[in-house]
Image (spheres, rainbow, N blue to C red):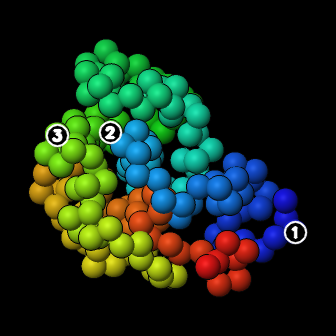
Amino acid sequence: MNEKRRCAWCNLKNKKYVAYHDNEWCVPNFDDHYLLEMLILESFQAGLSWECVLNKREDFRKAFDGFDIDKICDYNADKLQELMQNEKIIRNKLKINAAVSNSRIFRDIIKEYGTFYHYLEKFTKGKIFREIGKTANDLSDKISKDLNKRGMKFVGSKIIYSYLQAIGVIYSHDKECFLFK
């Protein structure tokens, strides 16, 4: 597993991290279900490392009903309390509440644009961006500003930049990485 050179941030001792780097990060995936999962997970990253969130990904999937948007949008106070008691996920009340309210806004965006990716295309024009060594850019600034205006939380420019990398809108593999194109 360690014979290939990977991006400097990839912890080679963490199999989940290596698998994420090799098979998922910067790979275009514009399925609404995946886009919601990544948006929720990235919002939980705020102030933490992606590795911390990734290590808990399966527990997040279980806790958030497989990231089923309709189920999440219907969460009530009892479900929120259940999530707050779940020691296997990040138990930040503001982030948990944001995951639910952001999901509702995500669903509204799908109703408006047909898919969440069509909404993103309003900003990207369908283009894949290639850049290395950044944590934000004009694109992430614009999307973040619009999502905040719509009421989403934990979607600052750096989180949105990471999100765009995760879903393959921004391609950022290091030049030394075996996946660099």
Q: Residue at x 47, y 53 (%)?
A: 29
Label 1 residue SS: loop
Find disc 3 in the rendering and name its residue: 111
Q: Residue at x 28, y 34 (%)?
A: 100
Q: Badge 3 local density, few (<14 within 10 Å), some, or many (20+)? A: few
Label 2 residue SS: helix
Spot occupied by residue 136 in the image (x, y as percentages of width and height): 37, 75
* Amino acid type of the residue tagged 3 in the rendering: Lys
* Disc 2 from disc 3: Cα separation: 18 Å
Spot occupied by residue 87 in the image (x, y as percentages of width and height): 54, 28
Q: Residue at x 84, y 59 (%)?
A: 1
Residue 14 higher or lower than 133, as above or below: above
Depth check, mark 1 against mark 3: the one in front is 3
Question: Number of labelled discs?
Answer: 3
Q: Nearer the viewer, residue 86 or 17?
A: 17
Q: Locate residue 24 relative to residue 110 in the image: left or right.
A: right
* Disc 1 from disc 2: Cα separation: 38 Å
Label 3 residue SS: helix
Find disc 2 in the rendering and name its residue: 99
* Amino acid type of the residue tagged 2 in the rendering: Ala
Tell me if label 1 and label 3 are in contact, CB under 8 Å. Answer: no
Find disc 1 in the rendering and name its residue: 3
* Disc 1 from disc 3: Cα separation: 46 Å
Q: Residue furthest right?
A: 3
Q: From the image, which quarter does the C terminus lie in?
A: bottom right
